[in-house]
Image (cartoon, coloured by chain):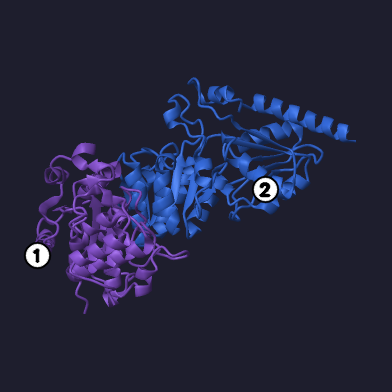
Chain colours: A purple, B blue
Amino acid sequence: MTTFDPSRMRRTVLEMAYAGSTVHIACAFSIIELLTALYRNHLRYPGNDPRAEDRDYLVLSKGHGVMAQYACMHERGWLEDSHIQGYFKDGSDLKGLSDSRVPGLEVTSGSLGHGFSVGVGIALGLKRKGTDQKVYAIVGDGELNEGPIWEGSLVAAHHRLDNLMLIVDKNGFQAMGTTDDVLSLGDLQAKFSSFGFETLEIDGHDETAIDAAIRQLWATSPNKPKAIIARTVKGKGVSFMESINLWHYTRLNPQSFAEALDELGLTGASK
Amino acid sequence: MREAFSNALVRLALADSKVLLLTGDHGYSLFDEFRRNCPEQYINAGIAEQNMVGMAAGLARVGFRPFVYGLAAFVPIRTVEQIKLDIAHDDLPVVLLGDGAGFVYSHLGTSHQSTEDIACTRSIPQLQVLSPADRYEMTAAMDHAYATSGPVYLRMGKADLGDVHAGPISSLQQGRLLKIREGRADQPGLIATGSMVRAAVDIATSMDLMVWSAPFLKPLDADDVCAAAQVTNGLVTLEEHSVLGGLGAAVTEITSEHQPTKVLRIGVLDRFSEHCGSYAYLLCEHGLDVDSVRKRIGVFCHSLASNSIALA
């Protein structure tokens, strides 16, 4: 059985980012514990099949964090080492943003404010079918600038989608600065509560708290959609990336790659 | 034509419980029959078109057959990105119904008028674009859309102009033109879509011209367009849509490559409406009334005749 150890996940992200000389490392690092907890303890994939008809759905609406999801898919055995080491090679399938054609990714996102609406539709459809499947939608706090998030929130509450859980990666940053500086979000827990969600705010890097919040929300308030406001650190896990928004855009060089691996207590290749 | 639309929707929904109608708080009386017959399959998604289209993608992903209704100014125009990313990219079987296309909302101004929707949707991969001309084409277009495994945009324009076909069409063949009228081979042939097929027939009757209806803007059968060009002397396209990116563009893309022919594109000349008024008034403002179009076709015929004399 896989371990879904957050440090291993971060190493996989670093290896991909280094191999592909790509950006968005910090966007992936803030959701590592959230995804780790979901894949380890909550998401159901019968037969470990990412396309199983009766699976739960993980919708990564903030497509910029897709490397974190690739790391989990690698841990699940859905991606090979060659996918990690060959990231961004000409003709490869794994793109820099979530693409639904890849088994394991449910939506094509990166243009923000799309995935959540699709997730609302999936949840509405599953509820109409009377299944017990769950839908998790991870959105960035910057992504909350997008209008369809709030349209979808109204619809989710109106249709009593208690099989839908919105998880906000509240890392406090968006592309050009802090969310406070760019477009203030105010009290997110109060906002989503007032929209009709059962809402909890937690430390998004505390796996025990994440597990507990997910279980508590599913167990309470039938007829209400759920929301977790997860306080996170953009770039979490590597000191020189943490809350340094340059790591939204910065690429690794051999030195920063080695230093980052060193900080994770992991050196050399993963296998 | 709207009755044919409603009847087809009710018939499809009664036969298949996976058919869902989503509306962005539009179509009040239009959906009376649907709400009476299939209340559980009716979803008013609120005045939130972007979320509605994304949600339709989610519903299609888990096996439903959403028909998403809005005014063409909103579905597709307001939601082009959701159509592209959430629906077309994954080839999902969602039918997008854009009502009131063209100048139907003649008094309401630019926000409710739609003369760019064909251009915007035609360039989205995997998306078919249909534009029925009368109730018979509407019924066949709805059946075609339901039978299609991928996404379809169905454009509904002015709907009370009367029939152009003598009776029901058994089924639409994907991309094919429908011959409406025979006429002179030494004169231009008319290819029209949607509301302008009626005008084309009226003009062609007085000038004895051939007429085809184009219920498909995409795909558009290249062999049919070339054949129309071969049996006539020049072509005229007619649409209640911009001359950029619509039927005229689609026809000239084909003829310029496969069957070079003079083509007169009748449509909206890259401009917004200046004033408001009746539908007939607005067609006049844009030079799309029957008299204006007939004059332009007359000039075109004359120029073709002079050209051939000059060449001879």
Q: In the displayed structure, does residue B192 sit left or right of residue B22?
A: right
Nearer to the camera, B185 or B254: B254
**Residue B190 percent coordinates (x, y):** 69, 39
* Residue at 61%, 25% in the rendered image: B287
Q: Which mark is residue B254?
A: 2
- The residue mark sitting in front, 2 or 1, is 1
* Residue at 63%, 36% in the rendered image: B238
- Which amino acid is tagged 1? Thr
Per the image, label 2 sits on a secondary structure element best described as helix
**Residue A4 percent coordinates (x, y):** 20, 71
Q: Residues within 10 Å of mark 1 (few under 14, many from 20)?
A: few
The vertical placement of B292 against B63, above or below, is above
Looking at the rendered image, the quarter that the C terminus of chain B falls into is top right
Q: Is residue B208 something one can see in this rendering? A: yes
**Residue B264 percent coordinates (x, y):** 69, 35
Q: Write down the residue under mark 1.
A: A208
**Residue B36 percent coordinates (x, y):** 34, 47
The vertical placement of A259 against B284, above or below, is below
The vertical placement of A254 against B138, above or below, is below
Which of the 4 quarters of the picture holds residue B110? top left
* Residue at 38%, 65% in the rendered image: A87
- Which amino acid is tagged 2? Ile
* Discs 2, 1 touching: Cβ within 8 Å: no
Q: Farthest residue toward the bottom?
A: A1
Q: Residues within 10 Å of mark 2 (few under 14, many from 20)?
A: some
